[in-house]
């Protein structure tokens, strides 16, 4: 049998990011061993807030270029209590996603077996969404500035940038994704009543792109009304596309509704595959539980399944998800975020045992 080797860059980052990525690498090794058809060659990078404190840089200046040599990137989390969040986010996560043009941030949400939703009466069939977050521009374009510091006339601006090319490619990606899912249903989220330029452009481009997808049923929602719909009528939604900021907020809500942000995965994709894509849990560094051994590794395992699928290893991805679901089905293997007492170690061992069968 030909064994294909995938080169993986592993960046644990900060806090529990390091713990869940380490756990995930163990799981991936077990999968590769069990599968036999592929191998993973992993390179660990210490890029993090700790590195920033030591050297003044979260990652080397040519860091994003170094990552081009890899087939995929497995990322943990960024953020630390003693460094401002805008420095950590821009210093690491965005310094990778933006130069590598990982413009489609895909965030599946569904209820895994054994996990209950805080929404009363919602069952697994009613909550099965994919949120597509625009990941390259919009509110995260980095445009704006401050002047007149400390004076009453101090000014601070953050300018959202929406380009026709950027909006069209993410909406087209979302329609394509919706088309592949059984319900062929897409909701385009904006705030075009208040933001009368960029958000109106989103609405217009959605209507244009929709012409190419006559088999996809689509509608549009204002982001505020969308939060109500997610809670009150979760079964009315399937694929959702929104701006960088709106989708970030909606996907945290989605994760909470599906049981915990500790199980929510995400893929930062360059769909054209010109550059490597990056896979990470949605959650951050969670310093309140760092070092306690209780971080939920399920989000990172799920994101690893997305990574394997992206690398063409669908049977291994399916095996991993089956192992994860067999573990979540057992409440004695729930970590504290899910109301249980299990440790990261126990969940990881159980997933590896399930993989080995
Ligand atoms: N693993 C995700 C992560 O570390 N996120 C850190 C963060 O601050 N994210 C905010 C954002 O992406 O807007």
Image (spheres, rainbow, N blue to C red):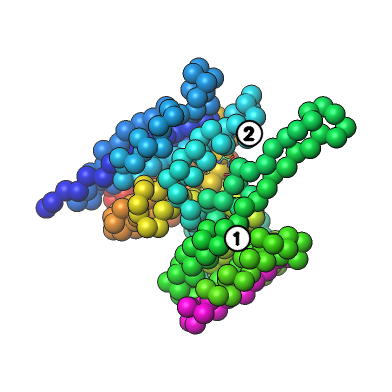
Q: Look at the image and say whether residue 213 sits in the magenta stretch.
A: yes
Q: First in sequence: mark 1 or mark 2?
A: 2
Name the foreground residue: 336 vs 98: 98
Dot 1: what SS?
strand
Q: Position of residue 112 (x, y in %)?
A: 50, 57
Dot 2: what SS?
helix
Asked if residue 239 is positioned above or below residue 336 in the image, the reply reads: below
User: Which residue is rendered at x = 49% and y = 45% of the image?
Assistant: 98
Residue 353, located in which quarter of the rendered image? top left
Q: Position of residue 244 (x, y in %)?
A: 59, 53
Name the foreground residue: 242 vs 160: 160
Residue 326 appears in the picture as rendered: no
Label 1, label 2: how many angstroms apart (C-alpha)? 23 Å
Ligand 1: quadrant of the figure:
top right
Q: Position of residue 332 (x, y in %)?
A: 50, 45
In the displayed orientation, state which residue is furthest to the left. 1
Region of the chain picked out in magenta, as a range = 210-226
- 41 displayed left or right of 67: left
In the displayed orientation, state which residue is furthest to the top. 54
User: Which residue is rendered at x = 48% and y = 32% of the image?
Assistant: 13
Q: Tell me, for residue 85, which label it has, or none.
A: 2
Q: Tell me, for residue 242, which label it has, or none.
A: 1
The answer to whether the residue bearing label 2 lies less than 8 angstroms from the nearest atom of ligand 1 is yes
């Amino acid at each position: 049998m030909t064994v294909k080797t995938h080169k993986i860059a592993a960046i644990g980052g900060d806090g529990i990011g390091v713990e869940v990525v380490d756990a995930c690498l163990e799981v991936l090794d077990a999968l590769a061993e069990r599968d036999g058809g592929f191998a993973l060659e992993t390179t660990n990078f210490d890029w993090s807030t700790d590195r920033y404190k030591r050297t003044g840089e979260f990652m080397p200046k040519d860091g994003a270029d170094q990552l081009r040599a890899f087939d995929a990137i497995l990322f943990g989390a960024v953020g630390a209590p003693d460094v401002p969040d805008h420095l950590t986010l821009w210093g690491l996560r965005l310094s990778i996603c933006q130069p590598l043009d990982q413009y489609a941030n895909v965030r599946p949400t569904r209820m895994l077996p054994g996990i209950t939703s805080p929404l009363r009466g919602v069952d697994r069939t009613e909550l099965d969404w994919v949120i597509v977050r625009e990941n390259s521009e919009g509110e995260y374009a980095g445009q704006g500035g401050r002047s007149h510091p400390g004076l009453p006339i101090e000014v601070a601006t953050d300018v959202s940038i929406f380009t026709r090319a950027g909006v069209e490619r993410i909406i087209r990606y979302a329609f394509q994704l919706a088309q592949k899912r059984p319900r062929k249903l897409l909701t385009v989220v904006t705030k075009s009543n208040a933001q009368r330029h960029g958000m109106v452009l989103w609405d217009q481009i959605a209507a244009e792109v929709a012409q190419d997808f006559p088999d996809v049923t689509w509608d549009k929602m204002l982001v505020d009304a969308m939060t109500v719909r997610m809670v009150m009528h979760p079964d009315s939604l399937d694929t959702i596309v929104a701006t960088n900021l709106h989708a970030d907020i909606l996907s945290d809500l989605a994760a909470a509704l599906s049981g915990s942000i500790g199980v929510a995965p995400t893929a930062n994709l360059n769909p054209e595959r010109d550059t490597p894509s990056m896979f990470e849990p949605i959650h951050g560094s969670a310093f309140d539980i760092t070092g306690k051994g209780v971080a939920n590794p399920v989000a990172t395992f799920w994101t690893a399944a997305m990574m394997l699928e992206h690398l063409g290893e669908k049977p291994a991805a399916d095996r991993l998800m089956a192992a994860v679901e067999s573990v979540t089905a057992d409440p004695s293997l729930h970590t504290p975020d899910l109301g249980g007492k299990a440790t990261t170690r126990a969940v990881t061992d159980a997933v590896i045992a399930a993989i080995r069968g």
